[in-house]
Amino acid sequence: MSDAIQSDWKTQVETWLLESRDGILSEEARRALNELLLADPEARKHARQFLLNDAALSEQCRLERAEQLFSHERSLPLPRAARIPRTPFLWTVAASVALLICGVTVWAGIRSGRLPEEMTSSGIALLSQTLGAEWGGVARRPGQVLEPGTLKLHAGLARIDFLNGASLVVEGPAELELRSAQDAFCRSGRVFAEVPAQAQGFKISSPDVAVADSPARFGLEVRADGGSDLHALRGALLIHSSEGGDRVAPGTAVTLRPGRKPAPASFAEARFRTPEELEAALAREFAERYAHWKSGLAQPAPKDLLLHYTFEAPGESRLRNRGAVQDPESDGLIVGCQWTAGRWPGKAALDFKRVTDRVRIRVPGSFDAVTWLAWVRVDSLPNNLNSLVLNAGYNLHWQINKEGWMALGAPGAGTRERGQSPTLITPDWFGQWIQLCSTFDGAAGRVTHYFNGRKVSEARVKSGLKLALGDADIGNWVASQERGGHALRNFNGRIDELLFFSRALPADEVKKLFDWGDPCRPAPGGLGILQADQAPVSPGHEPLQTRLSQ
């Protein structure tokens, strides 16, 4: 390229950039600038340098004006024209330049329709609460996003909140088909429904009847003999059956059978469990479950349980270690985190939100085998890597990738070995309490991952490795305190229990720990359900000293 031609395109780029800065760049010129910067690395380099030089001159003029205004004060040292001043203003400009280059690509993508597609979800409802629920097929937990499909509830109660605002309390045994955010079909069982005005258009039906566009509370029962009973608890119901449309007045009930007109039936509001009753029963159940978990803490800790943070002292600046290590230095030092609600009402937890939030811990020595286990609520995965526990030397890293897989890092000879799980924590799990567990067995060269008490993967690493923790952070990264610029790995969510063992727990012990701490599991001796004619649920929880191997 001749000097004249090169000078021409550089002058044109500079003109366009100045016009863009002043807000007078035409749409045609903006397209031409974007196309040039996308296609030519040399043009991008020249644009960046021109903007930085322009910013430097602007900064120098600003300082000179300031010196003139305050000439009676001590003179400020002016930057040389050939050197870009290191000021916050220019760091902002540099960042803006980078954003300009990135923005060019984004703008071009918008114009050409090549931007990556947004993430999507097929969820139409939320399983918000359960009590003594026994499911057929796939196990389900409160907080789970529900997609279209059939739910089979063998026993207990489940509250389902549809995205349009309608709410159902289903009592097992029941079978319910979720068709859309505005449509459900009850094949069998007993369902309480609340359809507020905001859920206009919601429809629930059975083989005999459909209830639609009725802001009201009502109960629907599909009996074993094939008939259906409908009770208008509050508000009138407009129904449609094989015999046409009809109206059910508040405080009345009708029974329906195929090929017959609706017939009056005995009104029985008490047959259906309301959300208020479910809430009260859950409060009692949670209190019993929390008390049972706390009773296990009175048992002596196993010798290989080095750390056990129960997050039981809201307001304090330290986490007391209830593990076998009786040393004040094993307590966790809270930095920045805020106390908040844990997995049971009355249970405390720490909320990790800011990039500075963390709990400082120290564990001396090295280990042939370890187990990390924690109850966490992941609110989002904003970083490429999100810390559960990290130390500075990358000798022991337990973290979650932005795609939702877990990893337990182990040092190799000049390498970093990492046992990685498949993707586990998707956005549908955000906001739910889950138990995460990872074990390392150095002799076997194996890292094993567990999710909610269930083994999900096993990864091979080099055998004979040892792990050392030393100074580490829960929910953050020690290295962030030692480097000027560092990758963000702060955890975004809540933690309300964390255990560290100096051995690799087998699968059965991980499952026992999950059962002991599961907030959704009925308390021993608790009914777990509201009906007096159903048997109590007694899962047989063991105390702490018998749950874990000594």
Image: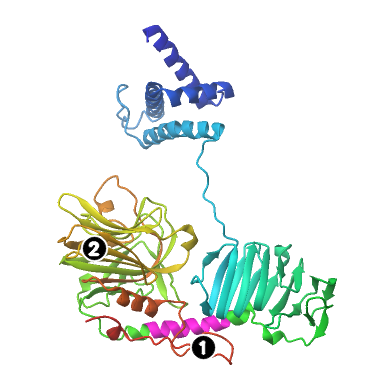
User: Compared to 127, does 260 lie above or below?
Assistant: below
Whole-percent x and y of residue 467? 19, 62
Please tell me whether residue 283 belongs to the stretch shown in magenta.
yes
Q: Which mark is residue 527?
A: 1
Q: Main secondary structure of the magenta part?
A: helix
Whole-percent x and y of residue 421? 34, 59
* Amino acid type for the residue under numbered disc 1: Leu
**Is the C-beta separation of discs 2 and 1 under 8 Å?**
no
Hey, which quadrant is residue 95 in on the image?
Answer: top left
Please tell me whether residue 202 belongs to the stretch shown in magenta.
no
Name the foreground residue: 272 vs 385.
272
Residue at horizontal 47 percent and vertical 67 percent from the top: 432
Whole-percent x and y of residue 138? 50, 70
Label 2 Cα crowd, 10 Å radius (few <14 / some 14-19 / many 20+):
some
Distance in Å between CA atoms under marks 2 and 1: 41 Å
* Amino acid type for the residue under numbered disc 2: Arg
Q: Which residues are magenta?
A: 279-293
Query: In what element is the residue under mark 1?
Result: loop
Label 1 Cα crowd, 10 Å radius (few <14 / some 14-19 / many 20+):
many
Name the foreground residue: 28 vs 207.
207
Query: In what element is the residue under mark 2?
Result: strand
Quarter in which the N terminus is drawn: top left
Name the foreground residue: 378 vs 172.
172
Q: Nearer the viewer, mark 2 or mark 1?
A: 2
User: Compared to 354, does 253 lie above or below?
Assistant: below
